[in-house]
Image (spheres, helix red, strand yellow):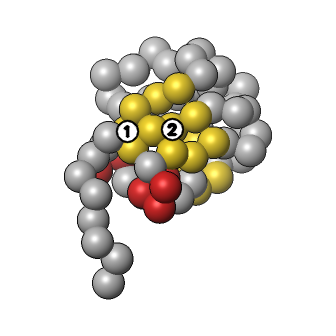
Amino acid sequence: MSRHADATPNDKNEYQVTEKDLPLHCPTPAMSLWNSHPRVFLPVTDSGKAKCPYCGAVFVYVGEKHAHH
């Protein structure tokens, strides 16, 4: 998500994330934190999609799927 250096919460409705964004949390490091909500970790690899319960941002995992051990 580093390509969204000026991203802010609710800047977009959907964000694509990859392996390098894991463990995924919202707000992400690329988002402005001064007006954000508390950090919440999101299990995006389980279903391939996760929604932030605070701001409603949707994260779609586009990385390689891993088998559970």
Rendered residue at 64%/49% (across/down): 39
Measuring from the top left, give residue 15's x and y in whole percent: 47, 29
Q: Are marks 2 and 1 in contact (CB under 8 Å)?
A: yes
**Residue 20: image location, x then y, percent:** 28, 47
The amino acid pointed to by label 1 is Val
Q: In this view of the protein, can residue 40 be seen by the observer?
A: yes
Q: Position of residue 11 (x, y in %)?
A: 59, 16
Q: Which mark is residue 17?
A: 1
Relative to residue 10, is residue 7 drawn left or right? left
The one of 45 and 36 positioned closer to us in this rendering: 45
- The residue tagged 2 is 59
Q: Residue furthest bottom?
A: 69
Indicate the quadrant where residue 27 lies. top right
Q: Position of residue 63 (x, y in %)?
A: 27, 46
> In the image, what residue occupies the spot 39% across and 20% down?
4
Q: Is residue 28 above or below residue 41?
A: above
